[in-house]
Image: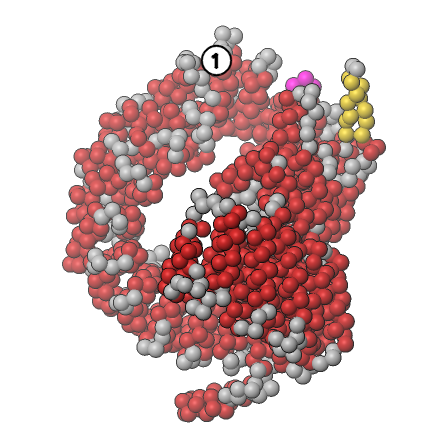
Amino acid sequence: MCLCTSQYTSALCSFRFMATNDLMMELQKDSIKLDEDSEKKVVKMLLKLLEDKNGEVQNLAVKCLGPLVGKVKEYQVETIVDTLCTNMLSDKEQLRDISSIGLKTVISELPPAATGSSMTANVCKKITAQLTGAIGKQEDVSVQLEALDILSDMLSRLGGTLYSFHSSILNCLLPQLTSPRLAVRKRAIIALGHLVLTCSGNVFSELTEHLLVELKRNESTSTTRTYIQCVAGISRQAGHRIGEHLEKIIPLVVQYCNVEDDELREYCFQAFESFVRRVFICCDRCPKEIDPHIPNVMGLCLKYITFDPNYNYNNEEEEEMMETENGEDEEQESDDEYSDDDDISWKVRRSAAKCLEALVSSRHDLLQGFYKNLSFKEREENVKADIFSTYISLLKQTVPSQSWLPASGASGKDDVPLTMLQSQVPSIVKALHKQLKEKSIKSRQGCFCLLTELANVLPGCLADHISSLVPGIVFSLADKSSSSNMRIDSLSFLHVLLCNHPPEVFHPHIKILLPPIVTCIGDPFYKITSEALLVTQQLVKVIRPLDKSCTFDAKPYLKDLFPVTLKRLKAADIDQEVKERAISCMAQIIYNLGDHLSNDLQPTLKIFLERLKNEITRLTTVKALTLIASSPLKIDLRPLLGEGFPILASFLRKNQRALKLSTLTALDVLVKNYSDSLKPSMIESVLAELPALITENDMHVSQVAIVFLTTLTKVYPSCISKISGSVLAEILQLVHSPLLQGGVLNAITDFFQALVLTQTAAVGYSELVQQLTAPVYRPGPAAVHKQAYCSVAKCVAALSAACPKEAPATVNQFIQDVKSPKSSSAVQVLALLSLAEVGRATSLSAQRELKAVILEAFTSPSEEVKSAASYALGNVSVGNLGEYLPFMLKEIGSQPKRQYLLLHSLKEVISACPADSLRPYVEDIWALLFKHCECTEEGTRNVVAECLGKLTLVNPSELLPRLKKQLPSGSPHARSTVVTAVKFTIADQPQPIDALLKGCIGDFLKTLQDPDLNVRRVALAMFNSAAHNKPSLIRELLKAVLPSLYSETKVRRELIREVEMGPFKHTVDDGLDVRKAAFECMYTLLESCLDQLDIYEYLNHVEDGLKDHYDIRMLTFIMLARLCTLCPNAVLQRLERLIEPLRATCSTKVKAGSVKQEFEKQDELKRSAMRAVAALLTIPEVEKSPVMAEFSSQIRANPEMASLFESIQKDSASLPTSESMDMS
């Protein structure tokens, strides 16, 4: 050790400095271990060095304390702390300061209490005892300030450890709120803010009671200000705890708003803002505790946002008229007149604006009120910025409100926020257009941000006001005093304006707008250039829109736009973003104005070719070429194609997915529009790359490649024949993949149809059908997945539709395959599915034996064959409704054994047939279905219900009331069928039935109170479907429905019974399925109707669920994890009650003799509980909770729980989104 040289008496200052520095380096190493004697010496010497006369030595000594805390024994740390606390009370200011820093360093290095170390608790207790004493010493303010600062640090980091001291800390801090020094009061407020995060309910109540008493007493305005600041500080730090006290606090704060003291008013509004912001119980709504006071608070905000006693806004119009005569003199005079430094009313207006913004952000239901009352009259720049910010928040809140707008014919239409906003647009523009030319850059930026948001919320709303806005835009772009950000904001607004409004409204202003935009393209700052090129790209579409007829002459403006864009396109030494924007902008110019470029076109295309060869710019250039090639102006690209096509072909080999996709799209457009300019050799170079792109590993690339192949097949049939073998092998492999579906399957069927229609193809109809069906008919070692049968059947049907002459032979073959006793069940299934797909598109009435063959298949011993036969009958009926549907209805009535399969066939008919085709048969089907709605088999009832629901969609106005009439039916089976049928009328897309359903869904939901358990279960399933797919149907009914829903979450003892199984007794809970359905509904409501829920009542039922059956607990753990994200503060409030069931689950041990399934079940339950714990730990203030800290230390102390928690954290780190549950 270098301590020998650091002896205070003998060594020089520089030696002491170097020795201390060496000591610090050594202490930072993990390997260093000190024996007891060394510890003593090092501690003693460092404490001595804190009193060194040299400041640098002192600073180094303080830095050594941090690493030293972890290296020495507990009693040495206590020695350090004792000495530092004593030094803090010293008369020497420098020693006081350095000791204060030393204490903060020690506190920051103490291990968290959760690690199980007793040192932290003991050291904290020592420090606290000394600090509370120091704070009580009124004579030296600087000591008080330092002590309060350190106490705040300690409470912030280790508040839970000081649990036993909380009461004495509170008693020490409260008197400081009346200190004559404001600095002491402020630090006491900060310390109290940290204290309330971890203190007990009793201490918190004591604090709030004290504040309430003092606020009522109102001893002096100065102390009242402090108490209101303190209330706001507590709310900001622990808003979830103050909720229950708001009832008493808010009226007092409202009362003080009316006191003639601007500073007091400012603090009152800050308090209101903290109540609204921090007492949020969920993402978009403030809590029920503050609900009754919202109108009052809002009224005060709107009153004081215009509170400016030193200025008369009523003279504004008169001033405007005078300003036109001698504007500058008037402005100067105005500035002189109102430069009153003592006027702080602007602080009141600013705090009112911020409070209003908090209200706007949290209350969708009050949007109308805000729109009616907000104004832009303000002279103070800072306040104006906050008013703009409030209005922007209001606009942002208006966007999602479109989903719950009433229908256009509904009453109260004028009160709809969007409609109100529309009517306000003229007055907004009037208020802002003058400010767009103000000297203040901040005000102008605020205007542009607001107008940008407005144009996004209401596209096209500024069409009538372009003439008012253009001068302001030009002023900000051309004004030399404008900052870079000002120009960028102006260009950004102009871009949104051009995108969201019809082109013709800009045509009169192009002459004025163009010069400053062109100047911005040449600006040396790359961000301005980039934004200007984006604007230019949109401007080109405006001056010559090709999708509509336009009389505006764009040619004169090309001479300004083209050279400046070309200069940026040619430049190699510019920012990447500018390069890409220049390429895109020039492509747009060629797309819209290429016919006016004459001799400039070909040199420009040569530059594109150069950019195509550059790895950095190739992707943007490919997209640019796609745009140019798709131009209706038929741009001449021949000089570029010879060299460009092989380059594009080479891109298909690159390991860059976005480049492959863009290249395939570009090639597709080039082949469609420039087929006469492409040589066979060019096409072949591309074709050679395609087989490698068709793979199940990337379905989207495969789809785009096959779409391109289809285009090639139609345009160059001769080229396809050369490579059809290799491409076909890949496509057939894809058809036989279980992953194939949707868009890729449609692309393949289109390709097959195009292929068989080209007479030059090497492979014809029969060969293709044979190759498609071969793996099923002649199975190899690797069996084809059942999912692939449907894909093969769809491809066969597409080929049959393209070749109607060859199709009958194939259909005959399939019928024989179904009939033949030698056929395997796999062959029969494929044959039936193929008949289904062919029969849906074309009538198979010529096949006389088809009905008998399908009905015979109904008796097959294979369930898969039966299901395929049912599917086939339904789809064949769709193609020949007149013959097959009456036959099917007759069979359903006369064949009870086949009923289930025949009903599935009927479901296929109802699902696939157009409504007009079905109308003549509706009555017969309806009557038949109601004969079977009381069937004892639940599976059959469900199919009947689905048929009824889908049939109701054919003629909702007539059939929905008839469905409703069946509700009072005496049979529980019939009621459950009717309710399930309603579930099948609800889809996530808009439908004609929606308006009718909204009117009567309340009647169907009354079945939640049905005496029959099963009816209640299906009613919950229907409610869940509505909440998931169309929340608007049930939103307004939630108040009436929620009590019934919550009652179903309760465990009912009368539904639990014991069943004897041999020597064992087994408990059966008949209410479990209903409870599970109820909790699933609750989860869905969390996602779709959160703002309609009383979250505290909701949490009561979640708490019950955490102690319920295995299945319910699994659900509620997921719900709790979701609640941690959506309503963290409400969860914090209930933390103690939520932790216990989690702790119980994580600590449960399975009995030694249990079966393997029981162990697996318990492990999964523990994992789910631990996921909920991990979600709880993401809430910022949760670690300050003593209960959570204790549980965390329990998890760390238990090896099994610790390893489980670690694996959960690893899993969540690898997943981008939180765990969620699909309840649809």
Question: In the image, is residue 1032 above or below residue 314?
Answer: above
- Give the residue at the far right of this rendering: 1054
Asked if residue 601 lies left or right of residue 657, the reply is left
* The C terminus sits in image quarter: top right
Q: Is residue 895 magenta?
A: yes
Closer to the camera in the image, 37 or 1108: 37
Q: Main secondary structure of the magenta part?
A: helix
- The residue located at (68%, 39%) in the rendering is 1143
Asked if residue 770 lies left or right of residue 975, the reply is left
Question: In the image, is residue 104 above or below residue 335?
Answer: above
- The residue located at (29%, 25%) in the rendering is 726
Q: Quadrant of residue 268?
A: bottom right
Q: Quadrant of residue 1102?
A: top right
Disc 1 target residue: 817
User: Please, what is the three-letter code of the amino acid marked with disc 1?
Assistant: Asp
Asked if residue 841 lies left or right of residue 762, the reply is right
- The residue located at (72%, 46%) in the rendering is 1137
Question: Residue 1037, how many percent across, how many down?
Answer: 72, 51
- Give the residue at the far front of this rendering: 10
Closer to the camera in the image, 726 or 479: 479
Question: Residue 839, how many percent across, how many down?
Answer: 49, 25
Q: How is the image coloured?
A: secondary structure
Q: Secondary structure at mark 1?
A: helix
Kindly tell me whether residue 203 is visible in this rendering. yes
Kindly tell me whether residue 923 is visible in this rendering. no
The magenta segment? 894-898
Closer to the camera in the image, 1161 or 715: 1161
